[in-house]
Image (cartoon, helix red, strand yellow):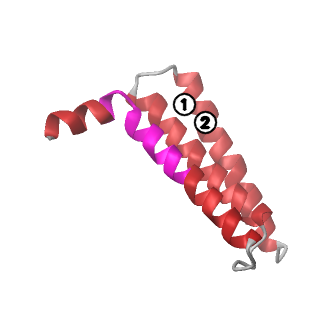
C-alpha cells in the first residue's frame, strides 16, 4: 500500500482526486440548493471552491516538478478567489 500511495502522490494524481471531490461537492451543493434545501447562493460558494481548487492545482504543479511560473499563477488565482470570497462576506452577501 505505501508504494501505491507514493505513486499517487508523486504522479500528482492525488491532486486530481481532490479536484474531483471538490467538483462533486459543488455539484451536490447545487443539486441540494435546486431542490430547496440550501439557502446559500451558489455565487457565495463558488469563490471559496475556486480558491481551494487553485491551491490543489498549485500542489499538483509542485508534486510533478512543474514550472515555477505555473505554481505562482495558481497561487495568485487562489489569492484572487480568496479576496473575492472575503469581499462577498464583507458586503453581507
Badge 1 vs badge 2, beta-carbon distance below 8 Å: yes
Q: In the rendering, which numbered label is found on residue 74?
A: 2
Q: Which residue is mark 1?
A: 71
Question: Dot 2: few (<14), some (14–19), or many (≥20) neighbours within 10 Å?
Answer: many
Residue at horizontal 67%, vertical 41%? 77
Q: Is residue 52 above or below residue 93?
A: above
User: Label 1 neighbourhood size at 10 Å, few (<14), some (14-19), many (20+)?
Assistant: many
Residue 28 is situated, as x and y percent measured from the top left of the image, at 61, 63
Q: Quadrant of the N terminus?
A: top left
Q: For the magenta stretch, what is the residue range? A: 9-22
As for residue 63 lying within the magenta part, the answer is no
Which sits in the foreground, 16 or 59? 16
Picture coordinates of residue 66 (x, y %)? 47, 21
Q: Nearer the viewer, residue 73 or 39?
A: 39
How many angstroms separate mark 1 from mark 2 (CA)?
5 Å
Q: Position of residue 68 (x, y in %)?
A: 52, 23
Between residues 21 and 91, which one lies in front from this camera angle?
21
Q: Secondary structure beneath disc 2?
A: helix
Q: How many marks?
A: 2
Name the residue at the front extreme: 35
Nearer to us in this view, 65 or 26: 26
* Residue 18 lies in the magenta-colored region: yes
Q: Is residue 2 left or right of residue 90?
A: left
Q: Find residue 47 and report its image quarter.
A: bottom right
Secondary-structure class at tag 1? helix
Position of 71 compared to 76: left or right?
left
At a point 54% along the width and 45% down the height, the residue shown is 55
Left or right of residue 48: residue 15: left
Residue at the spot 79% in from the left edge and 61% down from the top edge: 43
Is 57 positioned to the left or the right of 12 in the image? right
Q: Quadrant of the C terminus?
A: bottom right
Amino acid at each position: 500500500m505505501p508504494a501505491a500511495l507514493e505513486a499517487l502522490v508523486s504522479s500528482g494524481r492525488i491532486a486530481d482526486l481532490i479536484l474531483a471531490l471538490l467538483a462533486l461537492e459543488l455539484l451536490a451543493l447545487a443539486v441540494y440548493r435546486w431542490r430547496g434545501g440550501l439557502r446559500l447562493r451558489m455565487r457565495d460558494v463558488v469563490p471559496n471552491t475556486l480558491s481551494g481548487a487553485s491551491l490543489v492545482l498549485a500542489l499538483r504543479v509542485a508534486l510533478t516538478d512543474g514550472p515555477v511560473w505555473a505554481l505562482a499563477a495558481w497561487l495568485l488565482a487562489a489569492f484572487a478567489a480568496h479576496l473575492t470570497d472575503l469581499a462577498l462576506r464583507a458586503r453581507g452577501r
